[in-house]
Image: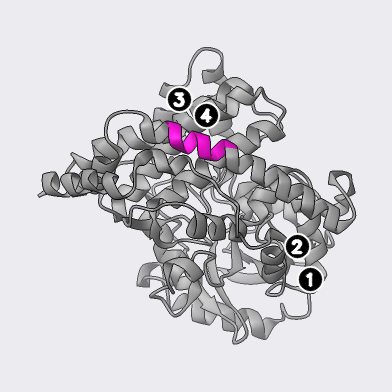
Amino acid sequence: MAGARAEAGRALRRAVPRSSHATWDPAGRRSPLALVEESDRRRLPELVPIRHARMAASPFAFLRGAPAVMAHDLATTTPVTGITVQACGDAHLLNFGLFATPERNLSFGLNDFDETLPAPWEWDVKRLATSFVVAARTAGFDQAVGRRAAQAAVGVYRQQLARYAGMRLLDVWYSRVDASTIIALSRGRRRRAVADRLARAQHHTSLDALPRLTEAVGDGRRFVEDPPLLTHVEECHTGWVEEVLTRYRTTLSDERRLLLRRFRTQDAARKVVGVGSVGTRCYVLLLLGDRHDDPLLLQVKQATASVLEPYAGRSRYRHPGHRVVNGQRLLQTASDIFLGWTSDGGADYYVRQLWDMKGSVNLDTLDPADLVPYGRLCGWVLARAHARSGDAAAISGYLGTGDRFDRAVADFAEAYADQTEADYAAFTRARGSGPGDEGRGGVTNQRKGDGG
């Protein structure tokens, strides 16, 4: 049976040659500035300037902040095989990282799912490859470094898909890339640095966030104002919090609902996060257990339609938070025990822990020698994620054992990186400012635990 699906995948090469994936032709594409403007209309107007400032920090920040632009381009100007998976929808290199399993072990995988939707597998692969080229250029690395990382990511994706295609379904489902695997893949002097970073991630929890984000007030705690990034706003009143939590509880399993009820709500505030997410409604809730050092920090993040929906079809889930949560559970090895969704009558949200042993690379300190190994790691876990929901045998049959597809996507990534730089230049001209005008909101690399 798997052999027949692999043969069907190979047959697709006649209609969609692997070399065709190198193609990028911008003729007839929609204006990227128009797509950004459309996205702005769904955001809080007072936060849009922060979003634009962050996107103006660099071409890579623009790529991060405008997933709708690349989604449109991939869907309307690039070839697809017709094989779908549960796609991440925004698989750039900073949307991979460390996260905690319910057993408190560290795993590495995708960690942002705002745009997840069943869609062509190629779209995730091409966005990942492009992100390596753009990131390398933004960091000032030699031009060849980004291409090598992009091609390495695609090559390992192809190799791992072949491996998963030959595995039992349950073995694919249970497979994971954990901390010990990451350390084993590291070489020489970098192994110690990787081990140190993993150790830091293990302490990146709600308890660690408590003194950073909150202060003692009377017999409880309260978020410390840091406008415009962390502010107490009128909508975060007691009634709103109770409504959000009541609806959220219904999406949890019984034992987790009971656990949540043991925490007392202390405070709520609006928190600006990430780059692409800036301007959407995002709040943080502070809850405490029986002790002052027993915190639970929840992020209540607005969920809207995926940027892929105009091209891949509407989500089967009526609630966009439900779409995000179920997409995450399909793509991740193990998910946050507090993952759920809710609404407040005016907007829909998904809920997760704010800090839960999350960590990602920092492009400002990344060594060029680390980019190719990191590309291989991302390619591996993307293949694992796609194999959980898609037809690994058919995709592997299409990809084959040679590197033709790898080289084609690397060519595409370089061409689309050129396009991204041109779009970025047009964006900064339209703003009337460049990367020196970020102000309070301008940052190139946001902590991934804080959102997309």
416 or 100, which lies in front? 416
State the image coordinates of residue 441 (x, y, percent, origin top left).
82, 54
Query: Dot 3 surroundings within 10 Å: few (below 14), some, or many (20 or more)?
Result: some
**Real-space CA distance between mark 1 and mark 4, rounded to the nearest whole angstrom:** 42 Å
Identify residue type, mark 4: Ala
Q: Amino acid at mark 2?
A: Phe
- Distance from the alpha carbon under mark 3 to that under mark 2: 36 Å
Residue at disc 1, secondary structure: loop
Instruction: Tell me which label, 2 or 4, sits earlier in the chain.
Output: 4
Q: Which residue is mark 3?
A: 183
Find residue 149 and name its label.
4
Secondary structure at numbered mark 3: helix
**What is the magenta range?**
407-414
Name the one closer to the observer, 327 or 27: 27
Q: Which residue is mark 1?
A: 232
Whichever of labels 1 and 2 marks the residue nearer the N terminus, that label is: 2
